[in-house]
Image: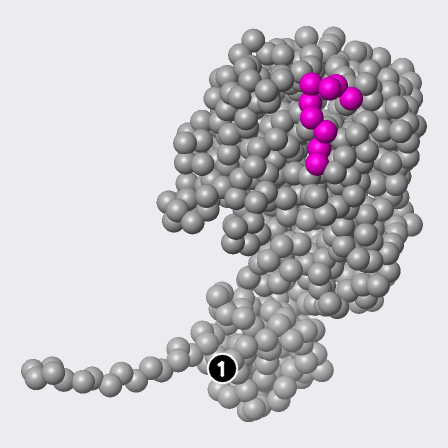
Amino acid sequence: MSGNRLVQARFVANPVPPARGVVVTERLRTAIGLFWTNPPGVSVTRVIVRRAIGTRAPRQPTAGVGVAILGPRSSAVVDSGLKAGTRYSYGIFVHDQFGHVSPAARITVRTANTRAKPLATPVVTLTPEPGYVVLGAFPRVRGADGYSYAVCSPTAAVCMPPVPVTPAGTAITGLHNGVSYVIKLVAIGDGTSTADSRVASRTAVPVATPLSPPDTTNVGCAPTSIATENTKPGGTGWQQPATIGAPLVQGYGQYTSVACGGTIGLYLGTQSPTPVPVQVEVWRLGDYQGTGGRLVWTSPTLTVAAPGTWETVASATDEVTAPWEETAVLAVPHSWTQGLYELRLVPVGNPSAAGAIPLVIRDATRTTAMVQVVATNTDQMYDTWGGHSAYSTSTGISTVVSLNRPYDGFGMAQVLSEEAPLAQFAEKQGLDTSYLTDPDLDAGNPEIRAATAIVVASHSEYWTPGMRANLEAAIARGVNVAFFGANSIYWHAVPVPSSTGPYRTLDIWKLNPKDPNASSPTLSSTMWRMAPINKPEQAVMGEQFGCTDVLEPLTLPTHLGWIFNDKNASAGLQLPGVIYQETDTPDPGVPMPAGTRLAASTTFACPQRGAGYQSGSSIALVPEPGGGMVVDVGTRGWVCLLNGSCVTNPVYSSSALLQVDPDIATGALAARNDPVAESVIQTATSNILNAVLTPKAAAYAKDPSYPLAPGA
């Protein structure tokens, strides 16, 4: 084009910046210690240290004499075998992942003269904490121009390279609880008239902090009914902070549940460079006069430091773990009431940066008629902490999932949105409930064997073989079951056996052809409905997962029957937003339990399954040969209506998605907490709970007001 000139640009890669802050950490007659900071924002693959006699430091990574360092990305070194009273100059070079090399970071140091007198011995005090040791403030040593400490083995025979420290002291992190460490502190001399001080050393053993709330002498948990428990005053401090971002302190529990009188280890970590003082607030979730929770106890302040390793990722499976030290041990007192709990990790003076750990507390001595099973497997499968989950991420899909890591975000996973609304609603009705987690159902805890009703909340997608076997055994005995969601019993998750208690790792290869157990009907971690397992969820629930990304009204049946006897209900009434996200519907190509009836049924297109694919959402009632009943409400939009907490995922507000997905009804977008829908669903929930609490409630499933399902 006339009048314009084509300018050719030449791009030159920026060099790797040099290491920063090179300081002396040890200056003896025959050794010199150095410490530096590798450049931030650089993926360091290798550090090279070169030495020359005199004041001219090596300027190339091949010049001078090489100095051995502890690891390829180390930031400290002790160079020994030197001559007394001699000047040495060092060049430190950093390599990045592209093979680029930084300019030299240079320093000249002189070893101590043979006649140099050592400085006075500094005073050192140590305070052991969980996973770290506090090196206390110490008085300055006359003539010193620096200080450093070194972490050594119990015999002091092996020490890490020394690290600089100021007289203000520091926290020495990355240590192991129960291991004895010797900490050496020295004042650094100038190399001529004085040498380093004589070593001041002390021994410390980091330990987990015991958390011991006040207790009583009764057996099991508090002998308090749920109705009485919920008359106590509550509060809203259990709710997730309004701020968005990772909490300052995160954590996970040794187990997903613990009995009153038992103990549970808490693994807490922070990425803060300085230890964080924290209090653990223990909240029990329930009704509590409409507040949703009660603060049961607040721990004394404990300090959480950065772990030595924040996370590990297995290269073959993308399994993520948080290999942290046990920070504290909580002794669960007999005075607490069994239930669904939130351990809130509150940084002192910064409550908006709180994180949390969900925990179920069980009563091993008393059982209740109703048991709610909390879907901890599913919570962990969707957990993206560490950058990986059982779902597609930018870095890969985990085929093995560990429970030994925090949940992402606030830390309560789906407990507050998918579990708590049902628990809070049932407790508001005064229904005595025990709570278990997936590993408890897998183990067949006594609560399952004593139950009249087992209830599952909104999203329980990943079931182990033991979970399903124990549920089906309970159904065969006449136990009633209610699923208040959809997409349950979908993936066949396989526990990795543990020698220390309930499983902490799950195989979930899904459809990955590298599954080492792909042909095994017991160890293959694919869908329950697929070969080689061939046990579709419809065999239990009378229907199975059919569609996702759904937002539709629920249409009430012609005959309301025993479920929909609410004053606001009428035949054909549409309840906006009840059918949401994932849905269950009978599959005509799959064997159907005899006598299955549909209390309500809505059909719609599901383009996610293919052009022209028809799906739906139904409330299935299954009479069982053992005399019990199974109920499945067939939608994940149900439980949030129990406390008015329904929200719409942004994907359902996308105009482009609404245009191409006819299963998303635009009229329902702003009506997910419709007061009429809330009233009808809450009444239906009460009716279902009362029905399943009736021993061997198959008669409810045989109500002729509701039609038989196709194929039943």
The answer to whether residue 236 is above or below residue 95 is: above
Q: Is residue 327 left or right of residue 277?
A: right
Q: Percent from the top left, x then y, of residue 597?
A: 72, 28
- Looking at the picture, the colour scheme in use is one colour
Residue extending farthest to the bottom is 63
55 and 34: which is toward the camera: 34
Question: Toward the viewer: 674 or 178?
Answer: 674
Q: Residues in magenta?
A: 702-710
Which residue, given by chain and number where applicable, does mark 1 sit on? 100
Q: Camera-side residue: 598 or 537? A: 598
Q: Is residue 279 magenta?
A: no
For the N terminus, give its image quadrant: bottom left
- Give the percent coordinates (x, y) of residue 510: 72, 57
The image quarter containing residue 513 is bottom right
Against 210, residue 18 (above or below) is: below
The kind of residue on which mark 1 rests is His
Residue drawn where x is 80% and y is 57% of the image: 531
What secondary structure is the magenta-colored segment mainly? loop
Please name the residue shown 56% across and 49% down the image: 613
Q: Is residue 181 above or below residue 680?
A: below
Identified at 85% across, 35% down, the residue is: 471
**Considering the numbered disc 1 on the image, is that residue within a helix, a strand or a loop?**
loop
Give the image location of residue 568, x and y in percent.
53, 12
Q: Residue at x 77, y 49 (%)?
A: 528
